[in-house]
Image (cartoon, helix red, strand yellow):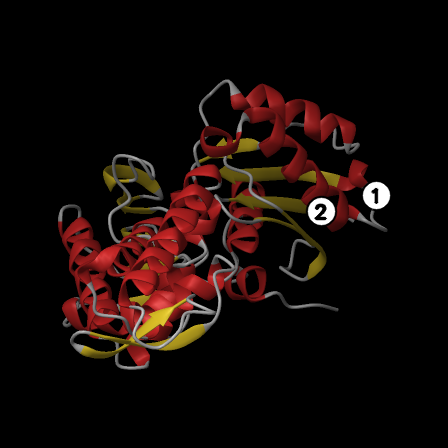
């Protein structure tokens, strides 16, 4: 039996899938981050290898006729890393290396032309014509771009929390969730000059000790800052907490959600063309306030949701050899024997 393999490697998770020609999924594997720009080529290659080995478990790798790897943050040189990974896994031919936007778009539609809006850890938009990327917006990385993506949202939430702890206030669900996320737990009511203030993370402070509370609150802020600077993945992982806080009525979190949606819609607007708009990435594929707001801002467009990115990559590999033949849905929805 001929097999087709696909990899979707992003800033948080790497996924690999192996399919039969009719789109039936025969194997699947996941691993950690596979973005070489963010985590280094060696670490990204190791994550991709783990995912691919898991997907090939129990299958003959020599039967893989074609494969596609969609890798966020990859350059042409990373193709050599993938070649070594494929050889190590027993797959004779290296994969065709494409961007994460290519496999994300393929995971949402078989239409050759349309627009992708991707918001996972990062954020980007791309216009496709004949399945080729003809225009790109953002995707400039966590430090200088990716506006409205998971890292951007998480950073905005953490920034709001530490500023509140530093005395700007107010305290609310977002501050408490961020404190818990960073291991700064506990809430004590402390009576100050202006009345009762909820100070997340403050324990062992007696009533009336406003100065002591303020000092302890600042120490909690400093600890969050140190942890965030040491491991930026903690910042990206705070993104869902912003949505949770917004749902709990936190006005600051709701403002972050609204601004993220506006920035994402603006990014899509820079490249919008004929065809559907595919929403991809964890920020936009699951039910949540950012997806709801972005969908409203794209009113009047056909909006689709990307399914499995590794399946989309595997479908692209099969498409090169077999043509569509109506198999897209089976590849991307994870149909098994």
Is label 1 in a helix, a strand or a loop? loop
Could you tell me which quadrant the C terminus lies in? bottom right
Expressed as whole percent of the image width and height from the top left, the position of residue 230 reads 47, 38
Q: Which of the pair 119/189 is nearer the observer? A: 189
Q: Which mark is residue 125?
A: none
Per the model, the C-alpha gap separating discs 1 and 2 is 9 Å
- From the viewer's perspective, tell me whether residue 138 is left or right of residue 74: left
Say if residue 235 shows up in the picture.
yes
Expressed as whole percent of the image width and height from the top left, the position of residue 63 reads 78, 40
Disc 1 or 2, which lies upstream in sequence? 2
- From the viewer's perspective, tell me whether residue 280 is left or right of residue 4: left
Task: Please tell me which residue is depicted at 38% across the width and 58% down the height of the picture.
Answer: 216
How packed mark 1 is, by other alpha carbons closer than 10 Å (few <14, some 14-19, many 20 or more), is few
Q: Residue 7 occupies which quadrant of the picture?
A: top right
Is label 2 in a helix, a strand or a loop? strand
Q: Residue 176 occupies which quadrant of the picture?
A: bottom left
- From the viewer's perspective, tell me whether residue 253 is left or right of residue 217: left
Q: Which of the pair 330/296 is nearer the observer? A: 296
Evaluate if marks 1 and 2 touch, with contact meaning CB atoms under 8 Å apart: yes
Compared to residue 316, the image places residue 164 above or below, namely: below
Expressed as whole percent of the image width and height from the top left, the position of residue 60 reads 83, 43
Expressed as whole percent of the image width and height from the top left, the position of residue 184 reads 47, 61
Q: Which of the pair 48/94 is nearer the observer? A: 48
Q: Disc 2 designates what residue?
A: 3
Compared to residue 298, the image places residue 324 above or below, namely: above
Task: Please tell me which residue is depicted at 18% across the width and 60% down the height of the picture.
Answer: 168
Q: Disc 1 designates what residue?
A: 60
Say if residue 305 shows up in the picture.
no
């Amino acid at each position: 039996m001929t097999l087709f393999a696909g990899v979707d490697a992003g800033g948080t998770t790497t996924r690999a899938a192996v399919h039969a020609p009719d789109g039936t999924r025969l194997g699947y594997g996941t691993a950690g981050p596979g973005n070489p720009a963010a985590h280094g080529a060696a670490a990204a290659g190791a994550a991709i290898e783990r995912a691919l080995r898991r997907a090939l478990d129990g299958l003959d790798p020599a039967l893989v006729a074609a494969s596609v790897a969609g890798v966020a943050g990859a350059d042409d040189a990373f193709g050599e890393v993938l070649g070594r990974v494929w050889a190590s896994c027993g797959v004779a031919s290296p994969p065709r290396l494409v961007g994460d936007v290519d496999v994300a778009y393929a995971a949402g539609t078989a239409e050759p032309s349309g627009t992708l809006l991707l918001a996972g850890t990062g954020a980007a938009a791309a216009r496709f014509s004949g399945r080729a990327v003809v225009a790109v917006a953002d995707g400039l990385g966590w430090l200088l771009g990716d506006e409205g993506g998971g890292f951007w949202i998480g950073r905005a939430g953490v920034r709001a929390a530490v500023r509140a702890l530093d005395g700007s206030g107010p305290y609310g669900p977002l501050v408490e969730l961020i404190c818990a996320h960073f291991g700064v737990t506990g809430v004590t009511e402390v009576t100050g000059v202006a009345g009762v203030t909820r100070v997340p993370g403050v324990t062992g402070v007696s009533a009336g000790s406003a100065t002591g509370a303020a000092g302890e609150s600042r120490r909690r802020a400093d600890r969050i800052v140190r942890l965030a600077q040491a491991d930026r993945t903690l910042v990206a992982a705070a993104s869902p907490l912003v949505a949770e806080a917004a749902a709990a009525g936190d006005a600051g979190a709701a403002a972050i959600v609204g601004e993220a949606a506006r920035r994402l819609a603006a990014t899509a607007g820079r490249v919008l063309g004929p065809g559907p708009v595919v929403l991809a990435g964890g920020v936009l594929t699951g039910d949540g306030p950012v997806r709801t707001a972005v969908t409203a801002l794209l009113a009047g467009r056909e909006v689709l949701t990307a399914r499995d990115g590794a399946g989309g990559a595997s479908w692209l590999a099969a498409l090169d050899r077999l043509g569509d033949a109506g198999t897209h849905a089976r590849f991307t929805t994870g149909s098994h024997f």
